[in-house]
Image (cartoon, rainbow, N blue to C red):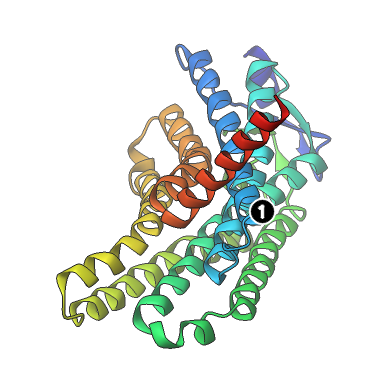
């Protein structure tokens, strides 16, 4: 990686550098095995999320507000890993560490928007669950198609606004001495830390983005499950409580898979070796889109039933053709 050292040693100031250099996974032993694992994750996430989307499209019984949220989650997961994983593999496997200034900011915009939407989708699904359990008689009115679609549209606009502001503020920065991004992709924090002028606005939008994308969704979800727990405690029979709780297991699994790895990285990231932090952060970014379709296929009775019905119909058509 001599080219990284030579680039870092240049004592030059850029208003807008022609290129950034993404360091990637440097000095990690046996890292190629990790790249094979990333390939597996990407293929599985594409197949799994595409399958969930097709099941919801072709099965007209899965048109409830809940499955609008599930469809949007699968759509976001598919785009998220498609935006991130191929570029990470291209950088690391084929040594394409150079990325143009404008391509880097564009790449960052799409990655951060889609990662933000993953958290916001969990809020939408949490809202659906709290309405279904606490207000079962008024569920169709309180969580109608219009309300769920409006929530999803609002969160898309919020994600675009937050990311667009963060990316836009980077364009005012000057870069001194180094244009080497110490990350596996065009990450916001490592880029603004390379600047030699005031980065207070960038730190501020970074803090606000963490609040809106990480802490507020997590607080809302935890609060909603406190309300759900209280509502379940008022149900008379244990069988009905278990039945109601089973409708939340899929969503709770998604919440744990998304938030726990990110919280671990942010909580202990300062004590981690930089390479360990990069690997853990990359896993936290790419693993949930792979696991989400597995959870919804195996833990949601309606999707399992629909999948069996579609597979049975396909087998019957194949037998007729033969």
Residue 253 in the image, given as x and y percentages of width and height: 36, 52
| 175 relative position to 59: left or right | right
Q: Is residue 218 left or right of residue 106?
A: left
User: Count of labels shown?
Assistant: 1
Numbered disc 1: secondary structure: helix
Locate residue 48: give its quadrant.
top right
On the image, which quarter does residue 320 sit in? top right
**Residue 138: quarter of image:** bottom left
- Image location (x, y in percent) of residue 309: 54, 47
Identity of the residue drawn at 75% across and 58% down: 168
Q: Position of residue 31 (x, y in %)?
A: 49, 16
Nearest the viewer among 259 and 105 is 259
Q: Position of residue 196 (x, y in %)?
A: 66, 46
Q: Is residue 210 left or right of residue 316?
A: left
Q: Is residue 47 above or below residue 239?
A: above
Q: For this rendering, which residue is in front, 245 or 113?
A: 245
Q: Residue at x 81, y 45 (%)?
A: 15
120 is higher (above) or lower (below) than 320: below
Disc 1: CA contacts within 10 A as few (<14), some (14-19) or many (>=20)? few
**In the picture shown, does residue 160 fall above or below 229?**
above
Q: Is residue 276 above or below residue 225?
A: above
**At 42% from the left edge and 46% from the top edge, which residue is drawn?**
295
Question: What residue is disc 1 on?
Answer: 58
Residue at image point 65% right, 64% down: 162
Q: Is residue 138 visible?
A: yes
Q: Quadrant of the N terminus?
A: top right
Point out the image quarter for the C terminus: top right
* 97 or 7, nearer to the observer: 97
């Amino acid at each position: 990686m001599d080219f990284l050292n030579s680039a870092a040693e240049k004592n030059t100031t850029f208003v807008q550098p022609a290129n950034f250099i993404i360091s990637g996974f440097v000095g990690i032993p046996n890292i190629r095995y990790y790249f094979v694992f990333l390939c597996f994750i990407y293929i599985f996430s594409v197949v799994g999320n595409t399958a969930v989307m097709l099941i919801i499209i072709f099965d007209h019984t899965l048109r409830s507000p809940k499955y609008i949220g599930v469809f949007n989650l699968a759509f976001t997961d598919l785009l998220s890993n498609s935006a991130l994983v191929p570029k990470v593999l291209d950088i690391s496997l084929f040594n394409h560490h150079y990325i143009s200034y404008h391509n880097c900011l564009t790449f960052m915009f799409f990655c951060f928007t889609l990662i933000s939407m993953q958290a916001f989708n969990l809020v939408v699904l949490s809202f659906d669950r709290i309405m279904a359990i606490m207000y079962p008689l008024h569920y169709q009115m309180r969580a109608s198609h219009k309300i769920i679609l409006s929530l999803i549209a609002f969160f898309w606009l919020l994600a675009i606004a937050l990311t667009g502001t963060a990316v836009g503020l980077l364009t005012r920065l000057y870069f001194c001495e180094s244009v080497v991004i110490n990350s596996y992709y065009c990450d916001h924090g490592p880029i603004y830390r390379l600047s030699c002028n005031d980065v207070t606005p960038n730190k501020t939008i970074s803090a606000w983005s963490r609040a809106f994308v990480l802490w507020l969704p997590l607080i809302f979800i935890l609060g909603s499950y406190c309300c759900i727990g209280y509502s379940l405690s008022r149900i008379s029979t244990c069988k009905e409580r278990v039945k109601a709780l089973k409708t939340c297991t899929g969503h709770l699994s998604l919440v744990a898979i998304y938030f726990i790895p990110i919280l671990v990285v942010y909580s202990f990231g300062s004590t981690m070796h930089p390479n360990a932090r990069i690997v853990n952060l990359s896993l936290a970014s790419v693993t949930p889109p792979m696991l989400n379709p597995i959870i919804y296929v195996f833990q949601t009775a309606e999707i399992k039933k629909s999948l069996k019905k579609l597979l049975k119909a396909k087998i019957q058509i194949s037998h007729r053709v033969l």
